[in-house]
Amino acid sequence: MKVILAQPRGFCAGVVRAIEIVEQALAKYGAPIYVRHEIVHNGYVVESLKAKGARFVESLAEVPSGARTIFSAHGVARSVEDEAAALGLPVLDATCPLVAKVHSQGERYVQQGRSVVLIGHAGHPEVEGTMGRIPGPVHLVQCEADVEALALAPDEPLAYVSQTTLSVDDTKLIIAALERRFSDIVGPETKDICYATQNRQSAVRQLSQLVDVILVVGAKNSSNSNRLREIGTEAQVPTFLIADKSELDLESLRGAGIVGLTAGASAPEILVEEVIEALRGLGPLELSMLPGEEENIEFKLPAELLDH
Ligand code: 2E6
Ligand code: F3S
């Protein structure tokens, strides 16, 4: 069997920073440290941090009085920040700087007197955070049909922002639909879909031209990982999103001569290595890696943790 690894794959700079914030907070302040929502959408990461003393909650009501609390990489609504302040919780914010950038763009558009259209998936924590940051009307659209259904005048002053982990191709179509329907609409000069999402999508598309099957290592609730699975499937390659080697269906791979392997932005490389080891159990394996976009983006930790 040949295995081809996509490049880049796995951790992005925002995920590295968010995990580092939890680890540094544990080192500086000691356990327990509370984290609102999974710090990133990956069970292995969450369990590893739990073992070091992090406690994960979905609501601030579950945090004991005065306990140090971290907001996840996906960001939070202003109301959550206000609730933490009202409860007097010391907070560290692990919101990815690229999500925070979308928040400020949205706020700027409202200051300019525009209503905001947010392109994203309902119910996703990043979308809830972004909607709850924009101090004016926000219209959520998930697909082109939602654009047609918007009850807004064609000359309404509008602006669009998006979730950071969407399909680049689907989002282009939605933006085109918005621009067809509305005469006074603006959007970010550089798209809100982050560099890591774009690079991982390009890499899996390239991979899909070369392989019989694609395995995407990532959690079922990880938006960016699901988008990678969709790209493989759309390219007519059987594509499986697996949390780790335990979800590998070796039987379904037996006929596959070339397997493509990638990982979502929140999936640690050790899970990819374990999948490769499991594949070695099927017989001799030839491993190679695609050339791909080099990434050297790093985000600074919050000042409070820098002196540690
Ligand atoms: C924060 C923002 C974007 O589900 P999604 O892909 O958004 O999140 P993760 O945790 O799987 O990936 C990292 C991330 C964090 N992406
Ligand atoms: Fe940030 Fe993109 Fe990663 S928004 S957390 S760099 S997937």
Image (cartoon, rainbow, N blue to C red):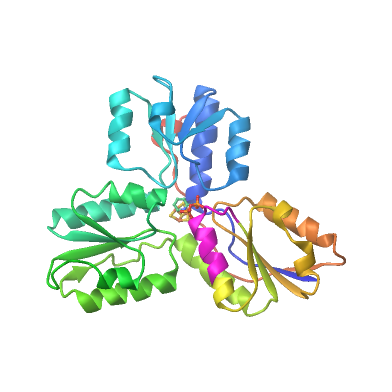
Looking at the image, residue 147 sits to the left or right of residue 300; the answer is left
Can you give x and y, in whole percent of width and height, for residue 12 in the image?
Answer: 52, 54
Q: Is residue 295 visible?
A: no
Q: Nearer the viewer, residue 8 or 148?
A: 148
198 in magenta: no
**Where is residue 292, by image quadrant?**
bottom right
Q: Split into 4 quadrants, where in the image is the N terminus?
A: bottom right
Looking at the image, residue 22 sits to the left or right of residue 283; the answer is left
Q: Is residue 23 visible?
A: yes
Residue at image position (27%, 33%) is 82
Q: Nearer the viewer, residue 19 or 247?
A: 247
Looking at the image, residue 243 sits to the left or right of residue 113; the answer is right
Residue at image position (13%, 70%) is 153
Number of marks in picture: 0
Residue at image position (41%, 52%) is 124
Residue interval drawn in magenta: 218-230
Residue furthest to the top in view is 65
Can you give x and y, in whole percent of width and height, for residue 294 in the image?
Answer: 55, 64
Q: Nearer the viewer, residue 14 or 254?
A: 254
Residue furthest to the right in view is 283
